[in-house]
């Protein structure tokens, strides 16, 4: 027989007390000095809604008296908590006084309804909770193996000092990693509660935070507050800092949004003997991580500091380090050439002294640069020069002026002139293939300012204003500069268009040409070409059309909202591919899903999103289990670096496990109590028995706690 919980013993005692009460009427008390029986606990049950929807199973409801949680109950049936029958679980509140207010909370948000506590009351209460924290925005993020360490909920209250909505999680649980959240002043209508979930590591769906992870939390707020700005106070123990050998000044808060960890403005607000308290400004809520970050240290080595023209030069950055996190990027600049990789090889065909520059970037976006010098000598410098000097010293000067000096002097002069024409805004890490500065003219018919270069890939620039005065400079670049990163798809050409300052953010059109030979080099067709503009930190696609095509060139025209860097690239839709470890499994069995067969013609696939059995997962390979038999659709959507998508589906059949299971049968809650007859009147003895039963129940409750 299953054991009856202490809570149910109390509820049964309440019912027995109610039945026995009439028998006690008129019974004389033999000893006027006997103590009165203690107050009987009150119990509550009823229906409940959360944010307008029936309360879901697994939700915990708290009963709160005088600011203290008196009891909790977990919802076992959608839309209600507890039940009216004697054996039904209920919210039981004891140690209260008659007339005390009993409030009800879910995840820090209070119900609109309250009740007055009365001894022995068994009361049905219908509750409505609003402003309950939600995690809908994060439900598509797979937690993977991340385990919940702590969960704390607290109500949103108005700070009397500032008037701002504030949540004190530290008051609810001093161990909470988030001690306080203060919402911005424009959130004055905010109400409800906030729920903080501490995890032991980053969720699988977010990937690792930059640097060395210190703590990870998910902050759930009411739906109306998900995009509200706020100040968050987070605490980190000094013991945790010692574990990762970090200083308080190294700590930084990050928020996961739009598929990546983004840095928040963070400062050390307080330091104690045991903790460091951080303050971070956030524009919204989701997953947060505190991590230790530092600047990397760039270290470059050359296999030789003096080489001959045409010889291989080996560059090595393996000695570069970062105290926290890892180095994710190595960029080299040598002789107007840009290289990437921890090690790289290059050759230089002209003699001279060249600077070699290395820039390393770690996973926190911090950078460091180191440089060295390499001397490149001509193969013939030693023997031929010595022979000429020895055989004809008088004609040496003429020879130098004509063949050596004249040829050597002309190139630097030309290079110097070209460098003078290059806009200062063009970074040093990219070579300039052509540059042209042209005067602008006004097209009276269209009221536009027009520039028509002749020596670059850009044929015409139109600015939608007739008030632009000055020159336009177009620089054809060998590749994308380091500050922009690669453009989406297969890069075809890159230019920088510099216009007068007043026209930088003015709309216009750009007409540019691409040679058929260049298309052949990237194995692209004209219809796949797209013009992109670099703005606000990324490459943005422009409306592009092919306006002309000859045997030699393709001419594109694109509409742009402003002027900066532009690229032409070939893009296409990716191709999604699913491979499942099995198409038929049993309930609870792991299913491995693999999207590594997906590909993209020009660029690369950057995102894999899975949907199966109402679960959303991310990653090239994922694993899931399904707990109910049936046939399920598995949907994969892949996105490439140009923002193009493709979706593919497959099916998985889940069969029930064919095993017999024996379980203990619960007691029959519907069993009728024995019929009471008029002959059974315990009188005074019955009253004392009930009082003894209540006392036993209270003792059992306390021992259970």
Image (tube, rainbow, N blue to C red):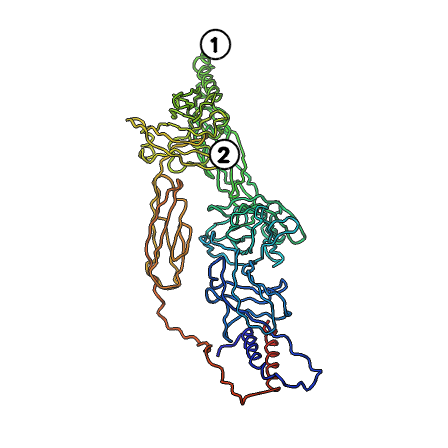
**Residue at the left extreme of this rendering:** 551
Residue 239 lies, with reference to residue 371, above or below; the image says: below
Q: Secondary structure at mark 1?
A: loop
Q: Is residue 473 shown left or right of residue 159?
A: left
Q: Which mark is residue 394?
A: 1
Q: Assess whether mark 1 and mark 2 are in contact (beta carbons under 8 angstroms).
A: no
Q: Is residue 180 left or right of residue 210?
A: right
In the rendered image, which quarter is residue 454 located in?
A: top left
Q: Position of residue 58 (x, y in %)?
A: 49, 64
Secondary structure at badge 2 equals strand
Given residues 498 and 293, the one toward you in this image is: 498
Residue name at image x 42 percent, y 20 percent: 442
Instruction: Pick whichever, 478 or 117, lies toward us.
Output: 117
Residue 662 quadrant:
bottom left
- Which of the 4 image quadrants contains residue 563? top left
* Mark toward the viewer: 2 or 1: 2
**Measured from the top left, where is residue 666 in percent x and y?**
45, 76
Count the numbered circles shown: 2
With respect to residue 98, does 365 lie above or below? above
Above or below, 98 against 239 in this view is below
Spatial CA distance of label 2 from label 1 is 41 Å
**Rendered location of residue 517, percent (x, y):** 32, 29
Which residue is labeled 2 in the image? 302
Task: Write the residue at 51% across / 51% down.
Answer: 224
- Taking the image as shown, residue 270 lies to the left or right of residue 391, namely right
Identity of the residue drawn at 41% across and 44% down: 606
Q: First in sequence, mark 2 or 1: give its number.
A: 2
Q: Residues within 10 Å of mark 2 (few under 14, many from 20)?
A: some
In this view, the residue farthest toward the front is 26
């Amino acid at each position: 027989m299953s054991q009856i919980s202490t809570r149910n013993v109390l509820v049964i005692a309440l019912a027995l007390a109610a039945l026995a009460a009439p028998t006690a009427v008129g019974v004389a008390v033999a000893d006027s000095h006997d103590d009165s029986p203690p107050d009987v606990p009150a119990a509550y049950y009823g229906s409940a809604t959360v944010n307008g929807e029936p309360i879901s199973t697994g939700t915990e409801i708290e009963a709160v008296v005088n600011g203290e949680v008196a009891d909790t109950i977990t919802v076992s049936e959608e839309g209600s908590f507890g039940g009216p029958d004697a054996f039904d679980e209920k919210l039981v509140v004891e140690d209260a006084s008659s007339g005390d207010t009993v409030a009800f909370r879910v995840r820090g948000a209070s119900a609109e309804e309250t009740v007055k506590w009365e001894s022995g009351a068994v009361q049905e209460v219908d509750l409505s909770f609003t402003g309950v924290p939600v995690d809908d925005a994060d439900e598509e993020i797979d937690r993977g193996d991340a385990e919940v360490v702590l969960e704390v909920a607290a109500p949103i209250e108005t700070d009397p000092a500032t008037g701002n909505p504030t949540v004190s999680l530290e008051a609810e649980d001093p161990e909470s990693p988030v001690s306080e959240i203060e919402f911005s002043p424009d959130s004055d209508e905010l109400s409800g509660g906030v729920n903080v979930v501490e995890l032991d590591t980053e969720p699988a769906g977010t990937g690792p935070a930059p640097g060395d992870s210190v703590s990870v939390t998910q902050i759930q707020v009411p739906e109306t507050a998900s995009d509200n700005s706020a100040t968050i106070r987070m605490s980190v123990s000094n013991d945790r800092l010692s574990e990762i050998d970090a200083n308080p000044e190294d700590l930084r808060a990050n928020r996961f949004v739009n598929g990546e960890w983004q840095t928040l403005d963070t400062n050390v607000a307080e330091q104690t003997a045991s903790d460091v308290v951080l303050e971070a400004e956030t524009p919204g809520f989701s997953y947060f991580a505190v991590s230790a970050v530092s600047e990397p240290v760039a270290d470059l080595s050359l296999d030789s500091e003096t080489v001959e023209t045409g010889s291989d030069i080996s560059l090595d950055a393996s000695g570069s380090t970062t105290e926290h996190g890892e180095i994710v990027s190595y960029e080299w600049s040598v002789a107007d050439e840009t290289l990437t990789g921890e090690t790289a090889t290059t050759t230089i065909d002209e003699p001279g002294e060249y600077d070699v520059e290395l820039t390393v970037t770690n996973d926190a976006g911090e950078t460091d640069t180191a440089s060295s010098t390499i001397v490149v000598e001509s193969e013939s410098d030693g023997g031929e020069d010595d022979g000429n000097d020895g055989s004809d010293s008088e004609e040496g000067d003429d020879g130098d002026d004509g063949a050596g000096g004249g040829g050597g002097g002309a190139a630097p002069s030309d290079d110097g002139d070209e460098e003078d024409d290059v806009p200062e805004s063009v970074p040093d890490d990219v070579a300039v293939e052509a540059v042209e500065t042209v005067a602008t003219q006004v097209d009276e018919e269209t009221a536009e300012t027009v520039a028509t270069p002749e020596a670059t890939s850009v044929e015409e620039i139109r600015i939608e204003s007739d008030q632009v005065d000055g020159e336009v400079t177009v620089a054809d670049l060998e590749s994308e500069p380091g500050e922009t990163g690669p453009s989406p798809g297969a890069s075809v050409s890159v230019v920088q268009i510099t216009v007068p300052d007043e026209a930088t953010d003015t709309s216009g059109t750009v007409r540019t040409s691409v040679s058929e030979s260049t298309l052949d080099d990237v194995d692209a067709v004209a219809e796949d070409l797209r013009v992109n503009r670099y703005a606000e930190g990324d490459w943005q696609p422009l409306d592009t059309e092919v306006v002309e095509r000859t045997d030699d060139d393709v001419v594109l025209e694109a509409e742009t909202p402003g002027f900066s860097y532009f690229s032409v690239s070939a893009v296409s839709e990716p191709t999604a591919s699913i491979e499942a470890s099995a198409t038929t499994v049993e309930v609870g069995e792991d299913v491995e899903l693999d999207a590594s067969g997906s590909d993209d013609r020009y660029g690369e696939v950057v995102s894999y999103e899975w949907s199966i059995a109402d679960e959303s997962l991310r990653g090239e390979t994922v694993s899931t289990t399904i707990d109910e038999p049936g046939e399920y659709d598995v949907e994969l959507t892949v996105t490439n670096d140009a923002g193009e998508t493709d979706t593919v589906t497959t099916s998985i059949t889940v069969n029930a496990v064919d095993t017999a299971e024996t379980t203990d049968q619960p007691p029959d809650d519907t069993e009728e109590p024995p019929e009471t007859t008029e002959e059974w009147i315990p009188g005074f003895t019955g009253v004392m028995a009930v009082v003894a039963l209540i006392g036993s129940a209270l003792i059992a409750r306390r021992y259970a706690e």
